Image (spheres, rainbow, N blue to C red):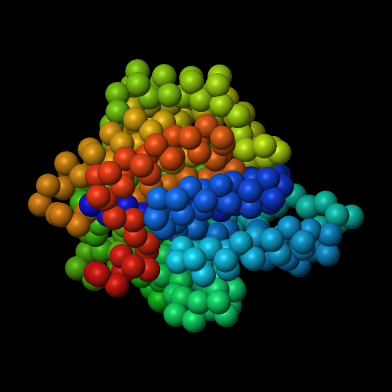
Amino acid sequence: MNIILSIDYEIFGDGSGCMDSCMVKPLDNILNLCSQYGALLSIFAETMEISAFQASNLRKSEADLVCQQLQQASKEGHDVQLHLHPQWQDASFSQGQLNPLDSNKWRIANLDIDEQTQLIKTGKEWLENLIRPVCADYQCVAFRAGGWCIQPSHSIIQSLQENNIAIDSTVAPGAKNNSRADWFNFSKAPQMAYWKVDTDVLEPALNGIYELPITTSKIGILNHLGIILDRMTNDLPPHGCEGSYSIPGVNESRLFSKLKKLSNLGHVMLDISTMPANALIKITENWQRKFPDDPDVTAVAIGHTKNFSTRSALEFEKYLDWAVQQNHQFTTYQQWLKKH
């Protein structure tokens, strides 16, 4: 079995959080663990926020550390791919402070196709300009929509095709979020390890780009609830990483938003930043059993640096140790594409 370890590399959606504490230090921790077990990591870099910090005289040093880390990770064989939260478009600073981001652009799916195409083009070029000086054969081939907000997906798929991006890895089969501002619904995703799409990310097609979904599984409502409660009471975010999950200008409390997300209770992603090792192992085994006729089935894990705590590191190391003992192979999006 193959495993893609992917991590969303970003601060908080409203612009809060420190890049060093929420991105650089947690990623260093993850990369060190990967190195110990011979694992490769695929980093979905939020290019818009990084470039916005680059353009700020007072915050440029933070972005420089991020860019150096991405280059070094690439030199060590890890993968860097495209992640976009379009509220960062036209981000600006006043007196060293980030001005409020445009919450009307929270969902990339709500933008018109020309804007989608341009944002993807800009993000891809930014990554290739950053990575190719240290890895000449680097290709930006994969995309993940910020907040999983890829629906409706027709124009986004077209924009990805126009920019020669071959893989979307946003869909988490069975997952849904009913929150008004950042909704998604993947409950009707096909029961396939991957598929091609040309109009809708949930409808397999003969041609188009690949949808390589995030691995999900049912683990039981009580088990899931226990994991959530344990994390709430016994876990802390990465040291110094503080920020808000609220969406500016949206009159929906975080509590109300969380209650809506309880519709997912019992159905989880292979999340290396929030799930204990025993759950990660069970999710991976369930995914493998789901596709018994595919010896090369690939499980895609997800995580967020801003959520990757000391506790996360302990559980992630147990998972890596198990995967190595099971002779599972770690791969990346670029490597996966070469075989398909």
Q: Is residue 271 above or below residue 143?
A: above
Q: Position of residue 19 (x, y in %)?
A: 68, 51
Of residue 208 and residue 283, the one placed in the foreground of this image is: 283
To which quarter of the image does residue 232 belong? Answer: top right
Q: Is residue 159 above or below residue 93?
A: below
Left or right position of 23 against 340: right
Q: Is residue 132 above or below residue 69?
A: below
To which quarter of the image does residue 40 belong? Answer: bottom left
Instruction: Report the residue that reaches farthest toward the right.
Output: 95
Query: Residue at image x 38%, y 44%?
Result: 320
Query: Residue at image x 77%, y 63%?
Result: 60
Q: Position of residue 141 (x, y in %)?
A: 41, 70
Of residue 97 and residue 77, the one placed in the foreground of this image is: 77
Of residue 233 and residue 329, the one placed in the foreground of this image is: 329
Query: Residue at image x 31%, y 47%?
Result: 324
Could you tell me if residue 175 is visible in this image? no
